[in-house]
Amino acid sequence: MVAASLLTQLKTSLRFFVKHPWQLWLTLLSIALGSAVMIAVDIANQSARQSFSDAVDHISGQATHYLIARNHQALDDTLYTRLRVDWGFQQSMPVIEENLVIHGIEYQLIGIDPLAMISIETQQSSVLPREQNWVRLLTEPKTVLITEQTAWQLQLNEQSTLKAMINQRTQTLQVVGFINNSALFSQQQILLADIATAQELTGMIGTLDRIALVLNTQQADRLASLIPENVQLITSSQRSNTLEQMTAAFRINLTAMSLLAMLVGCFLVYNTMMFSVLQRRQQFAIQRMLGFTGLQIFWQMLIEALLFAVIGGISGIVLGIVLSKSLLQLVARTINDVYAEITTGLLHIEPLLLVKGIGLTLVAVVLATLGPALEAARIAPATVHRKSQLEQSSQRLTPYLSVTGVICMIFALTTLYLFPRQLIAAFAALFILVIGYSLIMPLLIQSLVNLCSRFLPASSSLSKMALRGLQRSLSRTNLAIIALAVAVSATVGVGIMTTSFRSSLADWLGITLQNDLYISSSSPDGTRVEGSLESFWLPALEDMPEIQAISHSKASHLQINNQSIALLILQPGHQRSRGFHLLQGNSNRQWLRYLNGEVVLISEPYAYHQQLGVGDALEAITSEGKPITLEVGAVFQDYSSSQGMIVMHRSLYEQHWQDRSISSIGLLLKEGADANQLKQQIQQLATPGQQAVRIRYNKEIREQSLAIFDRTFAITDVLRLLVILVAFVGVFSALMVLLLEKQREYAVLRATGLTPVQLAQLLLIQTAITGLLAGVLALPLGWLMSELLIHVINQRSFGWSMNSVLPVSILAQAVVLSICAALLAALFPIKRLTTMSLSKNLRDL
Amino acid sequence: MSDTPLLTATDLGYAYQEAGQSHTVIDHASLELAKGELVALLGASGSGKSTLLNLLAGIDQADSGSVVIAGHNISTLQEPDLTLFRRQHIGFIYQLFKLIPTLTVFENIALPLELCQIGTAQRLQQVSDWLHQIGLQNRQHAFPDQLSGGEQQRVAIARALIHQPMLVLADEPTGNLDAETGLHVLDLLTNLAEQHQQTLVIVTHSETVARRAHRVLEIHNGKLHSASSQLAW
């Protein structure tokens, strides 16, 4: 029987929203968009992670360990021979991975030894087809196996040829069969080749990316004692954790941004539901008068919200999947630029992830509805007699909200203080800060509106009318203003952070890139620094009269506490500390100690993550396996890696390592020397057909670095836009409902003599003030967010510190954006109101 | 009409605060209502008639005094017991009808029965009977905004009486209707209340309504007086 009255309640809800279709659709759209952004970021993150690990993991079957080079470059393939022949590890397989492009789509080429593969794969996971096919991988050049999905996608059969772009070169490949168990690779786009073919195609002659092994504990211990010092034995789980660890902060940042979209979505749901309560105030009072309890009304609201959340959430999944395709490209590009090479891959959609998305949407929507539901439950039956006293009651609440807001903000700051290094705590503080400021906003809005009314010219009656109208309906417009302000503040906050970061990066590049020309050893395709420069380069360059100073370096890795950390062995060309912005240990004495090989320099991220400072000791392992202690001489600013880096003087390196090679040379030219001419001379030194080198101008590197930075933040810009879109839908919805709700009042104004143009002006002034208020109030919150992002979240995520820049253009853009969003959102309702039927609306009075 | 009072209100007082000042609306009002009695409550606008109805129904809480209905002191009842009591024993009719706009005529009338947990078959039967009694059997699927004022008020009457509450409170039920329709509605209301032996309190400005009452009360400056002797009708 209770169910019968609940059904009747839901019937009233349904009919209410059917009568207010705009409200219904815009509420669903707000939820769907908020949910879609969150789900899309999750899918993109997950897919990027999968594309790093899955393919090789499937092919490696039951591999338990991998051998990789300590300096993260290639392994010498003679190691594989020694492994199988000399040391007897038969369950092992060499692997090469490289990206290639076919018809504009990125694929992963995996080179393996089919004979070795049989020794390590399981029956269930066998990927090799019948023998006559895979044997052709060994006997015929440039042959590959493809998955059935790839065959379908590229319209190929088991005998087709295809053209692929590998390292900027076009290669013709012969398909000799389909990979068995193609279903294992449903989320990857791969081609399988023999290791020799892969070496030839990728230019990695004589080298391997890694060796996969099946080992028990004893075998692993034995192998660890046999392998050379520059080779590392890692477990398969360690390998898959690598990218996980490297990109954790990046992913958390993206997730936080997507949660911000959800938070804005929550404001909008709160707004819509509260609005629907206000619209149904009389109805709820009648229900209460008839004998419905407050609890029954509360449940009516919650069930309404749950239904919205389910429909919005399901639509969010569909939208999210569509959106994630674009986001994945941006995420993968950033990971490729900054962390590690991955293929863009296909979307990896785990059902659990979708369940999580729907679950979070449900929780967020229900939480956002709690306030309106309580408000509805509190409606007294006596209200049935009374006109709305909402304005007075909302004004009475304002001081309490403000005090709660201040408490929230103090709590946010306390959280930051109590958890000085936790990234999650920093994001929690950011969200609490946003909520706290939102609670203070009604007071600020009231004060600003009062201030505006004081300064309005006496003659402008239309403006006064607009302002008074706004004052009277503040309880209804507040939430729309707050939602828009929060969304715009995200734009301001992230905008200031990005500008500050870019400016700090440009300054850092200015300090770091002190030379005019840089020569580096290059990968065969010339796209990345790889290997070492040949020994003739240094003496040849020293003879050139245009060169004032030569510095050189070698990029390597160092083992500290069983962790591999990037090492730069640097011989500066001049004795001053130019080239580093020293944050700690900035003294001549420390620099001289570095030049004498007594101390090393560590980058700021490494110092932050490892909690190291000047004078601390690092326990490292040399190439001969001997432990050495390195003293930290200074901490320098560095944005090249969020994992951190150690810089060691060449003299110190040569005391403990046999390696004498260099990978980069920096040339400082004499005053008046022509860099272009010198570059041409240097290019002539490089013998054709020998090692590839890259010669780049200072400016070129700077531009490339800034381009990578811009690409890295492209996804942030996209997410910012999405947050604004969510807010725009909310503001549109709020204004639409608000203006249509007051159409009877406007009908009276029209009947009294206001022309349609004047009515449109009145409404435009009102919405412009709404937008202006949101824009102005977004600025302090945006600035606060940027301070948190710059000085707390970035530091905790990446270990980077940077200077704050406050660009006026971003602040001005925010206010303009806010006004435009409000005006744009109001256009349609205004059109409807100015063309409404006067007689109908007056009759309804 | 029985001699045992159905409702006893004793020494009711109610005031509200405005700009730091207390304004008395109901000043030590006491009354008794017998079962099946029809009482008209007169008074100028703002004299506190509607507030008194709210106090009698427990919708507003009196500052002092008590209201006892059929032996239940509703002044001491807390939520949700107060709501449950009102649900079963009190019916309301308003000048502006106060129908739920998103429910049909049938659903509006059936709502009190649903809340009182009356079984579906019985509910359907009762609503059909009442639709017949108010002459709206052909409009049962219409929504309130599709009805005339008189029709809406007839639905409101059916909704107020269908679950056979002991007490029906009507706040100017004909105030929003033309004279002829008002008369029809009044006939319907008084006849049905009489038929079901329900106590009816009608707030009104209308002489016609007051003439139908067994007793007339008047409220002036918050004080309640018996007005039958003063009426010259």
Image (tube, coloured by chain):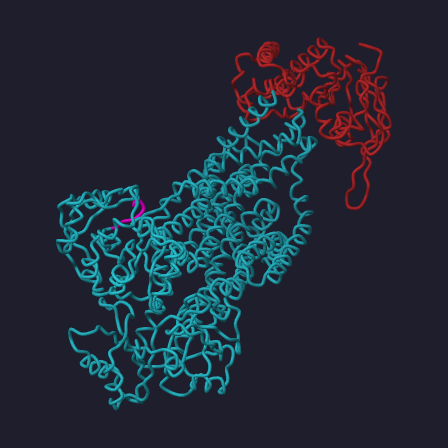
Chain colours: A cyan, B red
Q: Residue A479: x, y in percent? A: 56, 47
Q: Residue A12: x, y in percent? A: 55, 27
The reply to whether residue B120 is visible in this rendering is yes
Q: Residue A510: x, y in percent? A: 39, 77
Q: Residue A788: x, y in percent? A: 54, 62
Q: Quadrant of residue B63?
A: top right
Q: Quadrant of the C terminus of chain A?
A: top right
* A521 vs A382: above or below: below
Q: Quadrant of the N terminus of chain A?
A: top right
Q: Residue at x 20, y 83 (%)?
A: A681
The reply to whether residue A738 is visible in this rendering is no
Name the side, left or right, on which A477 lies relative to A398: left
Q: How many marks?
A: 0
Seen from the viewer's position, the closer of residues B65 and B144 is B65
Seen from the viewer's position, the closer of residues B133 and A454 is B133
- Give the magenta-colored segment's residue range: A185-190
Q: Is residue B26 magenta?
A: no
* A125 vs A785: above or below: above
Q: Quadrant of residue A205?
A: bottom left
Q: Is residue A187 magenta?
A: yes
Name the side, left or right, on which A154 lies relative to A24: left
Q: Main secondary structure of the magenta part?
A: loop
Seen from the viewer's position, the closer of residues A179 and A32 is A179
